[in-house]
Structures are given as C-alpha cells and as structure tokens.
Amino acid sequence: MIKSLSLPKISIVTPSFNQGQFLEATIQSILTQNYPNLEYIIIDGGSTDGSIEIIKKYEKYLHYWCSEEDDGHYDGINKGLSHATGEIMAWLNSDDLYCPWALRTVASVFSQLSEVEWLTTLKPIIWDWQGFCLHVKTIPGYSKEGFLDGRYLPSAFREQRIGWIQQESTFWKRSLWEKIGGYISLDFPLAGDFDLWSRFYQYSDLYGVDSPLGGFRSQHQQKSRQIKTYSQEAQQSLEKLREKLEWSPNKIRDIAFNSSLCRLPKFRGSIIKNYGYCGQKIIRRNADSSDGFWQIRPSFFLGFPGCIDRDTI
C-alpha cells in the first residue's frame, strides 16, 4: 500500500447542469473512495432542479464550486480545470460513476511508472439508468497508429472499430495538459473529448490499464446520443491530426483487418504480429503478495471479434 504522503494530488472536475437525479451518486462515487490527496471541483451551469442544494451538502469536501451560466459543457470543464492544481487531472460528468478503487489505482500507476503521461481502462463499464453495471467491455489495446487509422472513431463503421477511449476512465498528467495548451477546444461542442485525445497523441502514447476504472451511464438525455454529429466532429479532429503528422492509413493493414484468415488459428498470430497494432498494456504483477507492482507489457492486436490480442512475453 502507498503511504498517504506519497500519493499524488488528483484533481477531478464535475460539470453539471440540471442533473440533480444523478449528481449525488456521481459525487459519492468520488468522495467515498476517501482518497487523501483529492482536489474536487464542481462547475454548475446555473441549474434550477435542486442540484445546488446537493452541491452545498458536500461543499466542505470541495476545493471549488460555482453555479453560473457558461458557454457549454466544455467551457464549464475548462473553467473547472483552470482551478485545478493536481499532478493528475480528469473530469467526470454529473451522471457517470467511478469504480471504488479508481483513484488509488491511477495514483499507484502514475507513481510507479514515470513514462506514463495518460492512461485509460481496457475494461470500460456501461452503467444503466439506475446505476447497475450493464456491461463490462474489453478493448484489446490502444495504439497511436490505430487512432490515426480511425479505429477508435465512434462512427457508423463499427466493423472497422477496435473500440473507444472512454472519457470516464481517462486520466492524465498536468505536464501533458500544459503541453497541449491547457484547454479543451470549444470548436467541437460534442467531440471535445476526442479532440483532446488527438492533441494528447501528438506528444504521448496512451496506456491501457487492465482493470475497470469507471463507466458511462446510459440515459436518454446524453449528448452522446447525437452520435452522427459527434462522429462528424471527431472525424474533423482526426483529419487535422493526420494532416499535421502527414499520416495516411496503411492499405495492407486494412486488408489484414478485414481478412477472414485472421480468424483462423493457423494464420492469426502471424498476421497480428506483422500487420497488427502495438499497444502498451499495464498489468499487475505479484498480485498474490505484498510485493505487487505495475508492469508495462507490449501487446499486438487488430481487435475485431474473434481476433484476440497477442501479448509479447
């Protein structure tokens, strides 16, 4: 166990607007972890549904909060993050939930693995309306090349997807945040998170933790329901990154990705190793003793159903 004095400060921002029916559960999913070096910030957009009373109930645990009109969801998050002083940063929307172990896991990984500048989960959770766990998905890995190829786009081309980068489970270092200018772009009202990942990828690879960290609540009022507009914005952001890095998708890899041969055990390993993506997976070693530690292991994958990842030994 890490001593409290060595735990890095984690700054979490919750943006909220008229989400009173979910807000308290979100707050509790953070505060009940009893993480000793937490800086929690709530930015309310001028709610009229009882949210303010809920926030005031937890006021003594907050680093900062306000309730005032803003210029939208990402403007509120930017406002909150401008008050953050932590070494590790993230936001959790007012209808979503962290797992009880999320903050200590993230703190432990960042403390032990200095090369990690941002991370997310390989086991994203979907919560239902009432907060029950609906699904635990599995993402085979995260790769900069895969991102540039569009394999993490939330688009209609689902047969081309590896998965997605779950915002609710993504954390980053302040140093990386400062490298990209310290803001989320307001040019993408829905896909500001995807654009942030695009800008992070200019400086650092994304690492995947083989443990659930949090989840997205499925409910009908979400902006993410506007999937067509979100996808268009994400594609625009990706095109900007491709142009900046002079990137074109690999045609041979596209063929391999869609090849039925990869589903045959005889050919699978060779195809993945030669044409697959390489991601960085964070796993727990010596988990059955007090000497447990985190380790980074490369893994090769393509990621479609039936084509499992292939860890290197």
Image: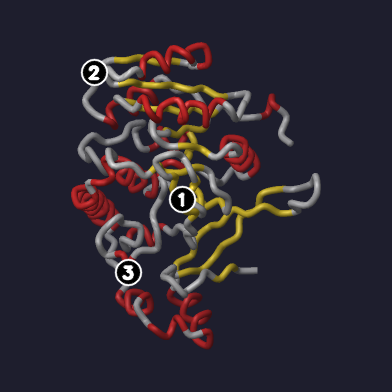
Name the residue rendered at 45%, 34% in the picture.
90
Q: To which quarter of the image does residue 246 belong?
A: bottom left
- Lower sequence index among marks 3 and 2: 2
Residue 85 percent across, percent down from the top left: 48, 22
Residue 284 percent across, percent down from the top left: 67, 52
Work out how far the residue at label 3 is from the one at label 1, CA to CA, in angstroms.
22 Å
Name the residue rendered at 26%, 40% in the picture.
223
- Lower sequence index among marks 1 and 2: 2
Work out which quarter of the rendered image holds the N terminus and state it.
top right
Q: Secondary structure at mark 1?
A: strand
Nearest the eye: 97 or 248: 97
Which residue type does callout 3 highlight?
Glu
Residue where numbered disc 2 is placed: 69
Crowding at mark 1 (Cα within 10 Å: few <14, some 14-19, many 20+): some
Q: Nearer the viewer, mark 3 or mark 1?
A: 1
Q: Secondary structure at mark 3?
A: helix
Work out how far the residue at label 3 is from the one at label 2, CA to CA, in angstroms.
41 Å
Residue 121 percent across, percent down from the top left: 51, 49
Which residue type does callout 2 highlight?
Glu
Residue where numbered disc 1 is placed: 134
Name the residue rendered at 40%, 21% in the picture.
42
Above-or-below relation of 45 to 224: above
